[in-house]
Image (cartoon, rainbow, N blue to C red):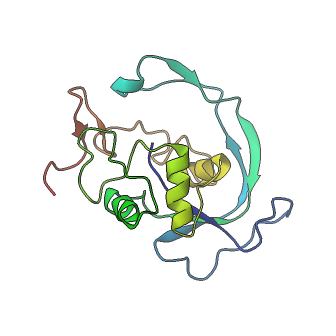
Amino acid sequence: NTIACSRPTLAMDLLLPLALECLPSAPAGMVCIPGGAGFVGTDDAHTCAQGENRRAETRFGPKSATWVQTFYVDLTEVTIEAYQACAKRGDCSPRKPSYNDYDRPRQPMVGQSFFEADRYCRNNGRGLPSEAQWERAAGGPSGEYGPFGEVPTTCDNAVVRDATGRSCGVAKAE
């Protein structure tokens, strides 16, 4: 679980038939995600290849039609460095990442609860994206399976746990 924050556009009214246009310049560190129709969930069974989640097959469905208004989302996940700064100010719960090899300042902060992630975002003037916003941002307007489309997530395109239980896809020294 990583944290990424979102910010609604000025008129976040899901009853509007048209998506609002993106502002000429997005807030610093954020990108505009154009609103529109999409889907949340899937009817496909999912078996995670990550060792800690391999125990069970899960379903994230049923696939449902949805519509989201234009919004802004962070360009990157919240880093360990940013989260620790929030904790040092006393605005966030003191936590360390719960994933082996995630200890470098610019890596994503992982393993927080919904409430800890929400607190971080709110203390930084934003909020957590909804499920529909997250899927829109990850899958784009065409509703791809994930940020890499239908390409499987591997050590070549992401930082994931390899067969030895260590992170791959990132240099061990930073």
Q: Is residue 42 above or below residue 30?
A: above
Task: Say which residue appears at 50% left-offset and 43% top-offset.
Answer: 113
Residue 68 shown left or right of residue 136 in the figure? right
Choose top left, top right, bottom left or bottom right for residue 25. Answer: bottom right
Name the quadrant of the C terminus: bottom left
Q: Position of residue 136 (x, y in %)?
A: 62, 52
Task: Say which residue appears at 60% left-offset and 60% top-offset.
Answer: 127
Residue 165 shown left or right of residue 35 in the figure? left
**Residue 136 appears anywhere in the view:** yes
**Residue 5 appears anywhere in the view:** no
Task: Say which residue appears at 57% left-offset and 55% top-offset.
Answer: 137
Identify which residue, 122 or 107, lies in the foreground: 122
Identify which residue, 100 or 146, lies in the foreground: 100
Task: Say which residue appears at 51% left-offset and 69% top-offset.
Answer: 30
Residue 43 shown left or right of residue 114 in the figure? right
Q: Is residue 12 above or below residue 60?
A: below
Q: How many marks?
A: 0
Residue 112 shown left or right of residue 63 in the figure? left
Residue farthest to the front?
90
Q: Position of residue 17 (x, y in %)?
A: 86, 62
Q: Position of residue 165 (x, y in %)?
A: 24, 29
Name the quadrant of the N terminus: top left
Residue farthest to the left?
173
